[in-house]
Image (cartoon, rainbow, N blue to C red):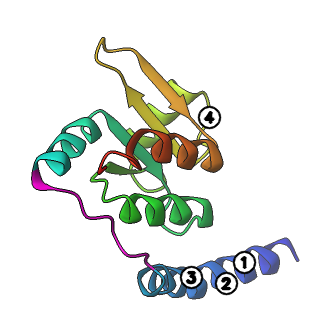
Amino acid sequence: MKFLIRLFFKTVRTVMGPLLLIWEIIKRPKPMHRQAALQAKVDNECRDLALFQFKTCPFCMKIRQEMHRLSLPIERRDAQHDAANRTALIAGAGSAKVPCLKITNAKGKVEWLTDSKAIISYLRGRFENAGI
């Protein structure tokens, strides 16, 4: 019975995963447009950020949508299939919970945000008005 339950959920994930990714592309918001100099500054600031994610995690998808809306080229690290990224996530954040945003400040201090609402709030607070 346990085998059948696992098989059922694996099948659901296998079928729904690609559909979720297609839905993410279809529902992608319109990106923010900035002047070239301002976008270059934002791009430079995004070098200190990395998003640890699972591709089909709905909370990760929500953050990727916000990154697209804000035109943020944040590095994405696959913590599901890449063992090195998973190990780095566990070592830094304390668990393999995604989404997780790694923020490295100018002094090299690292901060980890592990809640999707907190990550979106951080990104909006830091970058939403960068084009004004």
Dot 3 and dot 1 residues touching (CB under 8 Å): no
Report the Cα–Cα distance between label 2 and label 4.
Answer: 25 Å
Dot 2 and dot 1 residues touching (CB under 8 Å): yes
Relative to residue 29, is residue 44 drawn left or right?
A: left
Dot 1 and dot 4 residues touching (CB under 8 Å): no
The reply to whether residue 28 is in sight is yes
Report the Cα–Cα distance between label 4 and label 3.
Answer: 25 Å
Residue that badge 3 annotates: 14
Please state the horizontal and vertical placement of residue 65, each as a whole percent of the image. 46, 66
Relative to residue 75, is residue 97 drawn left or right?
A: right
Residue placed most toward the observer, 44 or 37: 37
Residue that badge 1 annotates: 9
Q: Which residues are magenta?
A: 28-36
Type of amino acid at the residue the image marks with label 1: Phe
Does dot 4 land on a helix, a strand or a loop? loop
Type of amino acid at the residue the image marks with label 2: Val
Dot 2 and dot 3 residues touching (CB under 8 Å): yes
The reply to whether residue 99 is in sight is no
Relative to residue 19, is residue 4 drawn left or right?
A: right
Residue that badge 4 annotates: 95
Type of amino acid at the residue the image marks with label 3: Thr
Which-is-in-front pick, marks 1 and 4? 4
Type of amino acid at the residue the image marks with label 4: Ser
Which label was assigned to residue 12? 2
- Decide which of tag 4 and tag 3 comes sooner along the chain: 3
Report the Cα–Cα distance between label 1 and label 4.
Answer: 23 Å
